[in-house]
Each structure stands twice: as C-alpha cells, then as structure tokens.
Image (cartoon, rainbow, N blue to C red):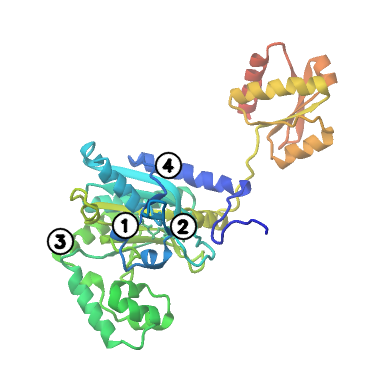
Amino acid sequence: MKIQALKGFKDILPAESGVWQRIEQTARDVFHRFGFAEIRVPILEKTDLFVRSIGEATDIVEKEMYTFIDRNGVSLSLRPEGTAPVLRAFIEHSLHTLQPVQRLYTIGPMFRHERPQKGRLRQFHQLSVEVLGADHPRLDAEVMAMAWMLLTELGLTVRLEINSLGCPACRPDFKAALENFLADRAGSLCEDCERRRLTNPLRVLDCKSSHCRAQYQTAPAITDYLCPGCADHFAAVEQGLDLLGIPATRNKFMVRGLDYYTRTTFELVTDQLGAQSAVGAGGRYDGLVAQLDGPKLPGIGFGMGMERLALLLTEQVGASAPAGADLYIAALGPAALERGFQMAHVLRGQGVRVSMEHDGKSLKSQMKQAGRLAARYALILGDEELASGQAVLRNMGAGTQDSLALGDNLHDWAAGLVARIAES
Ligand code: HAM
C-alpha cells in the first residue's frame, strides 16, 4: 500500500515555505516591537487541561481532539490550540513572579479532527499570543492593533469584528434571555442548535444554517445585558481602537468556539477564503488562569491561522518568488570545479547565497540551473579562465557580463566580489 500523509495533514513544500517564512519573520518582528517574548510549549498535554479550559461542551473537546491513552493509562491529547498549554506553563513556572505582566507568543502546530476543506486542516499552525496579568481596556486595543499591524505589514486587508461576552456577573442574565428566546423556537431549529440550546446556548448564535440565522436576527444581543463594569470596559476598548485608527465593527453574534472568554472578543475576517472566514481570533479570558489553579490574573490573546494567512497572501499579494541565490558558480573542468568548490565555501562564509553542482555538466545545463534558481549572478569558470586569471561574471537580470580578476588570496577576492554584488 502506498504510504501517504494523513487526511487533513499537509506537507509544506519548498515552493511554499518562502511564504511561511515571511509570515513567521514578520510576526516575530512585529511581536518583538510590542514587547512579546517567545515561549515554546509541548504539543502533547494531559487531556484534562483542555477539558477544563476550552470547556466540556465545546465542539473542540466533544469531537475534535486527538486523544489517546498512553502506556501508563493517562489520557493525553494533541493540543487543539495554544492558550491552554501556555497558561499551564505560565502557572507551572510562576512566571508572574518574574514580571507582573507577561507578554508571550508561541508558533506551532495545533490539531483538530475537523472535516478538512480549504483553509481548514487537521494539523494546522497558529501564531498564538497571550498577555497575562493586566486587564486595562487599552491593552485589548493594543493587542488588536498588533494583530492589525502584522496583517498590514504582510500586505493583507481584512475586517476586524468585535464583541463583548460580559463577565460571570452579567452573562447569566443574557444566557437566561437567550434560553427563553430559544425555548420559544424549540422544534424549528437545526439538530445542532436543538442540542446546543440545552448544553451551550451561546454557541447557537454561531450556527451556519441560514434557517437558524434568519431566526436569530431578533435574538437578544449580549451587549444589551452588560453590567456597568463590562459596558465601560467595552466602550473604552472601542475608544482605544479609535485612538490608534484601527477600524472595527461590532458583531453581536460573535460568540467564539471556546468557553473561556470574558468581555472583549474579536475576529479578523475575510470573504476571500470561502467558508473559513476567520484569519485570526481571540479575546479576553479573565477567569481562566485561576480556573486552572493559577493566581487570580486576567488575560487576553489571539490565535492566527498560518495556513489561512498563507492562502490569503497568495491570493491578495501574489505567489512568492523562488528561494533564489545571489551567485551561481558554473564550473567546467576538474581544476575549475575544485577552485569553485573553495570559492563557494568562502563566499558562503561571507554571507553570500551560493549554488553550484559538483558534476561539471555542460555550461548550457549549468546556466539553465542558474535560471531555475533565479540566481542574481553567475560566475563562469573554466580551465581557460583559471589559466588567464580572469573569470566571467554575468548579471543574470540585466543579461550583461564582465570579466572578474581571480587574484591569489581567496578571502580578499571573495570580499571584493561581495562588495561588487552588494552595490547592485
Ligand atoms: P480559534 O478561533 O479556535 O482560537 O483559532 C484561532 C485561529 O486559528 C482561527 O481564526 C483560524 O485562523 C485558525 N484555525 C482554527 N482552526 C483551524 C483549522 N482547523 N485549520 C486551519 N486554521 C484553523 C483559538 O485557538 C484561541 N486559542 C485563540 C486565543 C488565544 N484566544 C485567546 N488567546
């Protein structure tokens, strides 16, 4: 039987990895400007961590986790998201004692057994960001502004939608109103909503069925039920976004698929990825650290799906250029191959991206390879050039060429070539 990757698990091939590197480098750069530090946490955790944080009655915990019993009889799960493991590490290492406010990010694979489709995988990757220890509404605006800056620097255009989910003081009133509203419509909702109506009523607002959605147009809005503290917080978040010039629209139906959120929630959405419209999403979770037996500290964060960012980058900005090389050494004959071998090593040591093959193919075939790599320059070196002490340096883009003296000292020669390449 032919061995293939699992359904929903995707290889990121060399032609795509340039886009991924660009996303990752831009993200790190932006996050560092906002004072975030990287934390790397395990991919496997005790199942209980996710049940207690994401929530027992969520789709993720009910039917999407990769869970198994290990050799010691312990239930383990591949992480379906990054917040719970980061908080587990934060609590385990008492990071709050080092700095009262921790700004953390992590980048890596997450696993959810969902039905794969465009932009939805079973192994996907997130840029996952958390701030622990502060609940100022300006921080919420700052975190959203950081996500916005990252997308802007990648050249992407999306919409920012925001909502507030209230707190344990005001949400029960909203929940009761929603339950009444849904009870009046019992029997006319889809199968999922009929079930969620009883297990996790807020989740119905997220239903994709047009029949249910039409009915929910008149459902109570959580923002009408916020207590004064939550209402003030939400107003201040909107004002903060305004101060930074970040355009946001309210979406009263945004409820999020994870149970830990309080107050601010947000999604970065696009119409360009079919059904998978959220490029990123997050919100505040002021009770979660304590719920996981940590100190009573608030938190906020977001996750961005890297597959979706990569798709959108290809769609909105265009495919990436090939990896490329600064210089291709086309060497012909044993002596030139030997000299070229040394030249490539010394040039690489001086920061130049050099490609060359060792099998001395014809000049035509080597120049073809230089073209495939989109090399900026080609150095043509044959036994004749070695004897005369002059090689040929070809500017591949301009199609021009010059002779280049070889000299006796390889390091000095390489430094001269580096300067010359840098000029153009
Ligand atoms: P989430 O909304 O479940 O939130 O996921 C965040 C983002 O991950 C989504 O907006 C989407 O771009 C991407 N994503 C989720 N599932 C998939 C999938 N199956 N395939 C491809 N991309 C996917 C969280 O995970 C929270 N931990 C975010 C957060 C951090 N909230 C506070 N801090």
Helix, strand or loop at label 3? It is: helix
Determine contact: label 3, label 1, CB under 8 Å.
no
Helix, strand or loop at label 4? It is: helix
Disc 3 Cβ-to-ligand 1 distance below 8 Å: no
Q: Quadrant of residue 360?
A: top right
Q: Earlier in the sequence, mark 2 or mark 4?
A: 4
Disc 2 versus disc 4: nearer the observer: 4
Q: Is residue 329 above or below residue 8?
A: above
Q: Mark 1 points at which residue?
A: 48
Q: Name the residue under label 3.
A: 229
* Spatial separation of the CA atoms under disc 2 and disc 4: 20 Å
Which quadrant holds the C terminus? Answer: top right
Few, some or many residues within 10 Å of mark 1 (<14, 14–19, 20+): few
Disc 1 Cβ-to-ligand 1 distance below 8 Å: no
Q: Quadrant of residue 366?
A: top right
Few, some or many residues within 10 Å of mark 2 (<14, 14–19, 20+): some
Q: Is residue 187 above or below residue 240?
A: below
Q: Name the residue under label 4.
A: 28
| Image disc number at residue 157 | 2
Q: Nearer the viewer, residue 322 or 184?
A: 184
Residue visible at 42% across and 75% down in the picture? 208
Position of 375 compared to 154: left or right? right
Helix, strand or loop at label 1? It is: helix
Q: Nearer the viewer, residue 113 or 288?
A: 113
* Spatial separation of the CA atoms under disc 4 and disc 1: 31 Å
Q: Which of marks 2 and 3 is nearer the N terminus?
A: 2
